[in-house]
Image (tube, rainbow, N blue to C red):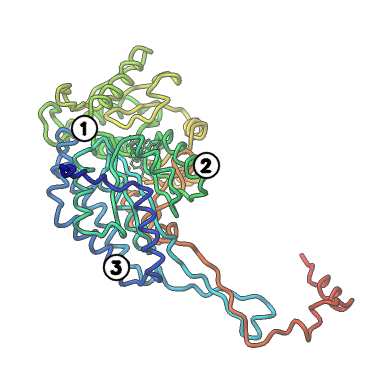
Amino acid sequence: MPTPAPVASAAPTARELLASQREAFRAALPVAAATRRERLQRAIDLLVAHAEELCAAMREDFGGRPEVFSLMNDVLGALATLKVARDRLDTWMADEPRASVAPFDQFGATAWVRYQPKGVVGIIGTWNAPVYTLFAPLASVFAAGNRAVLKPSEVDPRTADLVAHLVTQHFAPEELAVVTGGPEVAADFAAQPWDHLVFTGSTIVGRKVMQAAAANLVPVTLELGGKSPVLIGAGADIANAAERIAVGKAQNSGQLCVAPDTVWVPAAQRDAFVAALKTEYARLYPTIAGNADVTPAVNQRHYERVESYVADAAAHGARVESAGGSGAADERRMPLRIVIEPPADSAIAQHEIFGSALVLRSYHAIDEAIAAINAGERPLALYYFGNDAAEQAKVLDQTLSGGVAINDVLMHAALEDAPFGGVGASGMGHYHGREGFVEFSHARSVYRAGSHDPRREWGMLPPYTDAFKTMLHQGVTP
Ligand code: NAD
């Protein structure tokens, strides 16, 4: 009888990985600080040892993403989060004493909160920051003592495959594993009964993820996007604001969740701002075609999506100014298009731009701009430029966004000691810092009874007495 040809063993599914990780998790409790630190260190070592390969994969996936940006954003950004988690772990993990219950505290009853790992966490990442959106949440997930399965974006297939390969070299599949694939694999991934699910991506897919998670009562952290506004205050330094907005918008050619999307400027300053923004963008990118510092649109679909927003706005009568020289369609490198006062029903006014264009709107009183921002979904970031303390307080008090930067853009996302996350349609939950550790831990309250229980001798047990009832009534005070 002929020997059957060997059948290639299929990669394990999300369900299989979850089952094996969960079993390993339960068998190895508690998860000591040293174990957590060692896992974080291995993730750090993976990024350090393979930084160049990862940057090369991201360059290829984008058709020419600059190595400098991949190093800054994806490699160093993820490393910073992992190192903070490694170095602060012991403080975060410590039990927190809490006030006990009167009158039992008089007899030695104590209470504390302990932070326990939830178990196995699924992490779904995006294409725009394909290493960062996996490894930055992983820092908080590992710090909290969990195991994890990653699902990279299929839009960056080389980076996804490389991450999958490197993870198998540095981790046992029971600790950290990767599932690759497109929307079907992603939908199946979101439908698993994880102990927690982290999703970074668009608001529209975020809704589907939350629905899938709800079926299993899986808690979710949703890191979504939105139209992050910039409010340039009445007395702001226009040249300075233009420079910082140009620098921020140029990063990854606007393909960042916290990229400035819509800029509000005092009407009298509008044309001066347009001129300054064009000057500052051209200082960064005097040419676009053939400029290796310019990140291309990640693929043809996204290139055409942004081009169609600009064309649609122009067709609806918006003025469009271009900054940074001519684009190159064959390279998918785009100038910055400044779309001035597009109608509210145009595509660019309705959708997150997520590319090399921004909307400019003017206002006469800052209240108009605040009202317009509040009429939309709550954004991931909000930026304010100005030095008027009362105006700054008004902007902070009367708006809500995931995070804020004042007199700059993007920088709040680099705060390692503060939570990062959205609110409303821009997401829920956090990673980074202690808040990230808490997010992926279960805060478990523990009460420990004292040596003596006074309830019987104090008449607090049945048969109840009038004296006890009177005592309770005396406790009903404002
Ligand atoms: P996307 O929503 O299209 O895809 C994200 C991930 O979801 C991919 O891995 C994809 O495979 C997966 N997916 C697709 N269908 C799914 C389903 N039914 N169930 C579960 N997962 C599914 O987003 P994108 O285009 O990769 O990224 C761009 C968006 O992400 C923008 O809106 C941007 O603002 C946002 N973003 C947010 C952050 C943040 O930290 N808040 C960071 C980066 C990007």
- Choose top left, top right, bottom left or bottom right for residue 251: top left
Q: Is residue 5 left or right of residue 421?
A: left
Q: Which mark is residue 197?
A: none
**Relative to the observer, which residue lies in front, 150 or 336?**
150
Is 320 located above or below residue 54 in the figure?
above
> How far across and down, in percent of the image, does residue 245 sit?
29, 37
Mark 3 nearby-residue class (10 Å; few <14, some 14–19, many ≥20):
many
- The Cα atoms of the two marked residues, 2 and 3, are separated by 41 Å
Residue 5 image point, x, y percent: 17, 42
For the point 24% across and 56% down, the residue is: 79
Q: Is residue 326 visible?
A: no
Q: Nearer the viewer, residue 386 or 247?
A: 247
Label 1: element kind: helix
Q: State the SS at label 3.
A: helix
Mark 3 highlights which residue?
A: 37
Badge number at residue 398: 2
Circle 1: residue type: Tyr
- Residue at image x 73%, y 84%? 454
Q: Is 464 left or right of 89, judged from the image as shown?
A: right
Q: Residue furthest right?
A: 466
- Mark 1, ligand 1, within 8 Å: the answer is no
The quadrant of the rendered image in which ligand 1 is seen is top left
The residue under label 3 is which amino acid type? Arg
Task: From the viewer's perspective, tell me whether residue 31 is left or right of residue 73.
Answer: right
Residue drawn at (19%, 60%) of the image: 45
The residue beneath circle 1 is 281
Above-or-below relation of 447 to 272: below
Labels 1, 3: front one: 3
| Amino acid at dot 2 | Gln
Residue 235, image x and y in percent?
39, 38
